[in-house]
């Protein structure tokens, strides 16, 4: 694992909840599909266990509902979706993230695009 | 065929992950791992290669899972009520305790003690049954092997232990609901057994291990410490049981003993009055069985005894010095 990957993993940990909530806000989804959609959106280093653990934690916290959908070509799939509390949590976290990322962009101004390090 | 291989892969991989997370508290572990197999099956169904190839070693997967789940980041800070805050802080405190070294060490060897509990559980279950069927008997923790009843109890204990261990070996992979039932049953056995053990106050003192060293014999008063005297069994010096021995105190009053739960029948004198101080008393348990004499260990008399009137000191040195006052 390269230094960049380690950094990404560490940074991702804090915002994985937000990312998973955002993916599920688009459409209800099952574990491996959430992983795939996160990766399609550029979060290449997100681990399957991290996503599964996050889904279980959000579910236990009461932010998600879940239901099983039979699949024709494979095993049954457990779908997760946002409930009211999940949507509220997503809205608040999104605002927090927006102000945090503004602040960081400001702090890092001029270092982005390869000028840092 | 391929689906069979997939199923095996999922089972093996999930089992390793579960083993790695065995130290988590049961509720947390169940909440986290409830759909692990289902999730892994989804993963395996959508792609090529084994789970280990695609997700890395199961140990790493478990560590990542632990981090992702145990990150304890409140997912919805503003939506939390006070109650949830409390629950969270209790969980955090519990997590700290669970993370402590000594707790980990204890938690690590507790599973090794499981078979020991199975054996104990069988013994306790038999003990409870014995207690239920022997109202009126004095009950000991160990059956008396010289009676038929005791032999039956030992046999019952053997069978109960065998069943208990058999049951235990099969119960390692129970479903959640059944597991709760099983744990409740175990707790019930333990609680009832504690109650039964608490009732056992009638221990018979056994002096046989100190014979040969008369000075170390426990004082007679120890018998009183074990409970009230409910009968007296007189023996001659050579160990023959005596009957109808009349006992009187220093004032000439008949000596009587405490009433036990056993029924005592006193002989009637020629004048029709009951004789209450003729020992041993004839007693029957509530179920009608006669009360039998206890096994006793006789004190070692000094040998050779020069005369039947033994006023010599009980020390075995048999010194010829006459002792004017009898030592008692």
Image (cartoon, grey):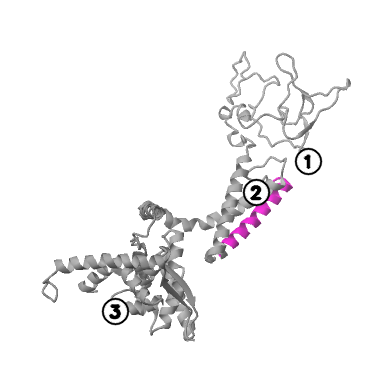
**B274 or A51, which lies in front?**
A51
Query: What whole-number distance in Å separates the C-alpha atoms at marks 1 and 2?
Result: 21 Å
Q: What residue is pinned by disc 2?
A: B128
- Looking at the image, residue B41 sits to the left or right of residue B316; the answer is left
Label 1 environment density (alpha carbons within 10 Å; few <14, some 14–19, many ≥20): few
Camera-nearest label, 2 or 3: 3
Per the rendering, the mark at residue B289 is 1
Residue contact at pointers 3 and 1, CB within 8 angstroms: no
Tell which subunit mark 1 falls on.
Answer: B
Q: Tell me the element at label 2.
A: helix
Tell which subunit mark 2 falls on.
Answer: B
Residue A73 seen in the current view: yes
Quadrant location, the N terminus of chain A: bottom left
> In the rendered structure, does residue A117 fall within the stretch colored magenta?
no
Q: Residue at x 46, y 60 (%)?
A: B27
- Looking at the image, residue B83 sits to the left or right of residue B225; the answer is left
> In the rendered structure, does residue B163 fall within the stretch colored magenta?
yes
Per the rendering, the mark at residue A41 is 3
Label 2 environment density (alpha carbons within 10 Å; few <14, some 14–19, many ≥20): some
**B264 or A31, which lies in front?**
A31
| Quarter-of-image position of residue B250 | top right
The x, y position of residue B130, in whole percent, is 68, 48
Label 3 environment density (alpha carbons within 10 Å; few <14, some 14–19, many ≥20): few
Query: What whole-number distance in Å separates the C-alpha atoms at marks 3 and 1?
Result: 85 Å
Please name the predominant secondary structure of the magenta segment in the image. helix
Q: Relative to B120, say whether A75 is above or below.
A: below
- Looking at the image, residue B88 sits to the left or right of residue B310; the answer is left
Q: Relative to B115, say whether A67 is above or below.
A: below
The x, y position of residue B102, in whole percent, is 38, 51
The magenta segment is B145-169
């Amino acid at each position: 694992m390269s230094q960049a990957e380690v950094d990404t993993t560490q940074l991702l940990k804090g915002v994985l909840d937000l990312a998973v909530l955002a993916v599920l806000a688009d459409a209800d989804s099952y574990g491996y599909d959430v992983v795939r959609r996160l990766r399609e959106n550029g979060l290449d280093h997100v681990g399957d266990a991290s996503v599964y653990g996050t889904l279980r934690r959000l579910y236990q916290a009461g932010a998600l509902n879940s239901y099983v959908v039979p699949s024709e070509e494979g095993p049954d799939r457990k779908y997760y979706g946002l409930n009211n509390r999940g949507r509220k949590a997503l809205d608040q976290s999104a605002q927090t993230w927006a102000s945090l990322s503004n602040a960081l962009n400001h702090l890092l101004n001029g270092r982005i695009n390869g000028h840092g390090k | 065929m391929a689906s069979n291989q997939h199923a095996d892969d999922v089972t093996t991989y999930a089992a390793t992950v579960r083993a790695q997370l065995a130290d988590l508290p049961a509720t947390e572990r169940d909440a986290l791992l409830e759909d692990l197999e289902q999730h892994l099956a989804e993963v395996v169904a959508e792609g090529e290669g084994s789970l280990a190839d695609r997700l890395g070693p199961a140990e790493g997967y478990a560590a990542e899972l632990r981090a992702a789940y145990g990150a304890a980041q409140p997912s919805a800070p503003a939506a939390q009520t006070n109650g949830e805050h409390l629950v969270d802080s209790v969980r955090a405190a519990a997590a700290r305790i669970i993370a402590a070294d000594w707790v980990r060490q204890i938690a690590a060897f507790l599973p090794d003690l499981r078979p020991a509990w199975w054996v104990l559980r069988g013994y306790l279950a038999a003990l409870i049954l014995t207690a239920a069927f022997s109202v009126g008997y004095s009950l000991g923790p160990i059956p008396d092997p010289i009676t038929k009843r005791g032999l039956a109890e030992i046999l019952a204990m053997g069978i109960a232990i065998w069943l208990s261990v058999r049951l235990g070996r099969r119960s390692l992979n129970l479903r959640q609901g059944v597991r709760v039932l099983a744990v409740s049953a175990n707790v019930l056995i333990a609680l009832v057994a504690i109650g039964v053990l608490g009732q056992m106050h009638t221990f018979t003192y056994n002096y046989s291990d100190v014979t040969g060293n008369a000075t170390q014999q426990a004082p007679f008063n120890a018998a009183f410490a074990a409970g009230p005297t409910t009968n007296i069994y007189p023996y001659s010096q050579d160990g023959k049981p005596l009957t109808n021995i009349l006992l009187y105190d220093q004032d000439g009053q008949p000596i009587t003993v405490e009433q036990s739960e056993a029924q005592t029948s006193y002989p009637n004198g020629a004048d029709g009055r009951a004789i209450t101080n003729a020992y041993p008393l004839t007693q029957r348990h509530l179920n009608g069985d006669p009360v039998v004499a206890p096994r006793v260990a006789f004190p070692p008399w000094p040998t050779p005894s020069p005369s039947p009137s033994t006023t010599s000191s009980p020390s075995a040195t048999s010194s010829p010095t006459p002792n004017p006052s009898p030592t008692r």
